[in-house]
Image: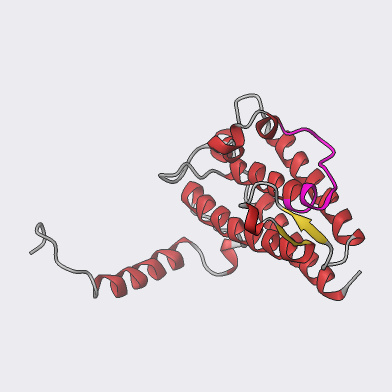
């Protein structure tokens, strides 16, 4: 395997593991509930990333997914059906789907040179033709991006970020730290009609 491809695969796996770890210890409700005004939720991130890998690192290089994704087949993906878990979809099912996507993508990484031609059917015609390496970089970046979302969503649920929260400090340390950050922000707060 090309050393650059091996590095990209390693970084991708670190982010994959981070996303899945963000669900650890949470209830079925907590991994599903929307935590932002745009409904970002942990299990939805897993489902979305699985589709991304099957698409960019599989379909786009002539290696169709080994499973059918109903939300792709019926077109509901374009209504964000890949961003949340239905009542019928279990955590175990979606995590296993994501791990199946990992295996499929890892096969592509092992088989294809980074300069292998690729085509993204859902992109505008003038941008569709690209390379496997470009798509691999895109998936690494997108997975890291969503791993950051998972950190924030997890913190909104139970106050714990993605790493080992207790390695840095206990609850009192975090409260004092947050107060320092807030005080620095307050220094730059502009008066509003209510506070003037």
Residue 149: where, in percent of width, then height?
Answer: 54, 55
Quadrant location, the C terminus: bottom left
Q: Is residue 67 magenta?
A: yes
Q: Is residue 28 magenta?
A: no
Q: Is residue 194 above or below residue 178?
A: above
Q: Is residue 119 left or right of residue 40?
A: right
Where on the picture, by quarter, is residue 80?
top right
Identify which residue is drawn at 44% across, 46% down.
36
Q: Is residue 171 left or right of residue 17?
A: left
Q: Main secondary structure of the magenta part?
A: loop
Most distant residue in the top direction: 88
Residue 131: where, in percent of width, then height?
Answer: 77, 63
Identify which residue is drawn at 40% across, 44% down.
37
Identify which residue is drawn at 65% across, 32% down.
71
Q: Is residue 66 above or below residue 55?
A: above
Where on the picture, by quarter, is residue 174?
bottom left
Q: Nearer the viewer, residue 15 or 72?
A: 72
State the colouring used for the structure image. secondary structure
Residue 180: where, in percent of width, then height?
Answer: 35, 73
Quadrant location, the N terminus: bottom right
Q: Which residues are magenta?
A: 56-69
Most distant residue in the front direction: 126
Q: Is residue 27 left or right of residue 189?
A: right
Q: In the rendered picture of this protein, how many numbered marks are placed on residues?
A: 0
Q: Is residue 176 above or below residue 79?
A: below
Q: Nearer the viewer, residue 24 or 70?
A: 70
Q: Nearer the viewer, residue 43 or 75?
A: 75
Residue 89: where, in percent of width, then height?
Answer: 67, 29
Identify which residue is drawn at 77% across, 51% down.
60
């Amino acid at each position: 395997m090309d050393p650059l491809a091996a590095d990209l695969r390693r970084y991708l796996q670190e982010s994959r593991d981070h996303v899945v770890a963000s669900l650890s210890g949470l209830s079925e409700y907590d991994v599903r509930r929307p935590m932002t005004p745009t409904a970002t939720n942990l299990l939805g991130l897993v489902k979305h990333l699985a589709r991304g890998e099957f698409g960019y690192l599989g379909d786009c290089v002539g290696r169709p997914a080994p499973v059918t994704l109903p939300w792709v087949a019926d077109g509901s993906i374009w209504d964000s059906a890949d961003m949340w878990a239905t009542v019928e979809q279990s955590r175990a099912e979606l995590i296993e789907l994501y791990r199946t996507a990992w295996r499929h993508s890892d096969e592509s990484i092992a088989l294809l040179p980074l300069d292998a031609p690729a085509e993204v059917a859902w992109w505008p015609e003038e941008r569709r033709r690209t390379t496997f390496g470009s798509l691999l970089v895109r998936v690494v970046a997108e997975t890291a991006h969503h791993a950051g979302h998972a950190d924030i969503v997890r913190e909104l649920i139970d106050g714990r970020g993605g790493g080992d929260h207790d390695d840095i400090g206990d609850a009192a340390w975090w409260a004092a730290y947050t107060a320092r950050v807030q005080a620095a922000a307050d220094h730059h707060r502009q008066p509003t009609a209510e506070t003037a």
